[in-house]
Image: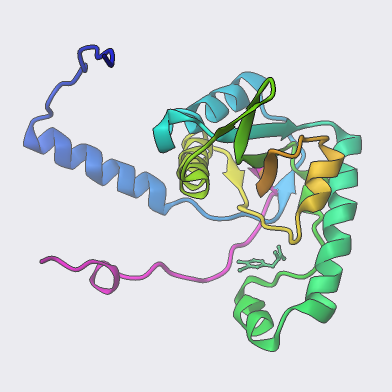
């Protein structure tokens, strides 16, 4: 028999519901991906709460198939930066087709990833594909979906705490497995530098799609 406990819930009045929905939207729409960081440190207890928030996300069979490696050590950050730049140099100079390079033009990105050395924390998110329970292998379910949702929570928590981040996807990411000494059942998912924006940093002049472009009522 599954064990169930009472669900604590208080229904909001309509005006309060609307006010909260509006203010969360106002908060979220101010979030931007940032590529230039200051090196100001983040209080560790803030980072811990952000990671705990991410881990409150729903996941397939509640397996919570994620690991968050919070890197603040300068030597490790430098090692990660150098490995990421080596891969990205090959991407930008040899592996990416012209269409992709053209699509990235508005963002002004290139193979240089200075932010990986400067940001006070890098959160390397790993997807845990299965768990080893002594000799037994225990499956996780909907791993990519689950970790994607958790990263959404993570980004919202970072933004809510007045910090900025970049959802970075160095590719391929095998170097993170080696440098961060993660076991075979964990695979790198995203690398997220977190911190404060460098004074005077600018962001690309881009917009989100309008509601009419993305929502269909039926
Ligand atoms: N991972 C590369 C390229 C890149 C790809 C996409 I799609 C972006 O939105 C941004 C960058 C890099 O980090 O430069």
Residue 215 placement: quadrant: bottom left
Q: Residue placed at 79% from the left, 45% from the top?
A: 176
Magenta stretch holds residue 78: no
Residue 45 placement: quadrant: top right
Point out the image quarter for the N terminus: top left
Q: Is residue 196 above or below residue 35?
A: above
Magenta stretch holds residue 196: yes
What colour scheme has been applied to the protein in the rendered image? rainbow
Which percent across, then down, holds residue 37?
A: 71, 48
Tell me: 9 left or right of 178: left
User: Which quadrant of the frame does ligand 1 lie within?
Assistant: bottom right
Q: Is residue 214 above or below residue 115?
A: below
Q: Can residue 59 be seen at all in this image of the molecule? A: no
Tell me: 149 left or right of 90: left
Q: Is residue 4 above or below residue 208?
A: above
**What is the magenta segment's predominant secondary structure?**
loop
Residue 5 placement: quadrant: top left
| Name of the residue lying farthest toward the bottom | 98
The stretch of residues the image draws in magenta is 194-218
Q: How many marks?
A: 0
Q: Residue placed at 44% from the left, 52% from the top?
A: 30
| Name of the residue lying farthest toward the left | 14
Which percent across, then down, holds residue 158?
A: 53, 38
């Amino acid at each position: 028999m599954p064990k169930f406990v009472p669900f604590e819930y208080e229904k909001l009045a309509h005006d309060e519901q609307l006010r909260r929905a509006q203010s969360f939207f106002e908060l979220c729409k101010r979030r931007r991906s940032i590529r230039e960081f200051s090196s100001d440190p983040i209080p560790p207890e803030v980072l811990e709460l952000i990671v705990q928030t991410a881990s409150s996300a729903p996941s397939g069979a509640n397996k919570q198939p994620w690991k968050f490696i919070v890197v603040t050590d300068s030597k490790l950050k430098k090692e990660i930066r150098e490995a990421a730049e080596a891969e990205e140099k090959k991407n930008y100079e040899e592996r990416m087709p012209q269409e992709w390079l053209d699509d990235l033009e508005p963002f002004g990105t290139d193979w240089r990833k200075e932010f990986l050395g400067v940001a006070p924390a890098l959160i390397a998110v790993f997807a845990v594909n299965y768990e080893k329970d002594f000799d037994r292998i225990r499956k996780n379910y909907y791993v990519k979906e689950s970790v994607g949702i958790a990263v959404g929570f993570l980004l919202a928590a970072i933004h809510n705490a007045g910090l900025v981040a970049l959802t970075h996807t160095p590719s391929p990411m095998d170097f993170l497995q080696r440098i961060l000494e993660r076991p075979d059942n964990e695979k790198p998912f995203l690398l997220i530098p977190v911190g404060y924006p460098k004074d005077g940093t600018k962001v690309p002049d881009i917009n989100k799609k309008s509601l009419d472009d993305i929502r269909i009522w039926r």
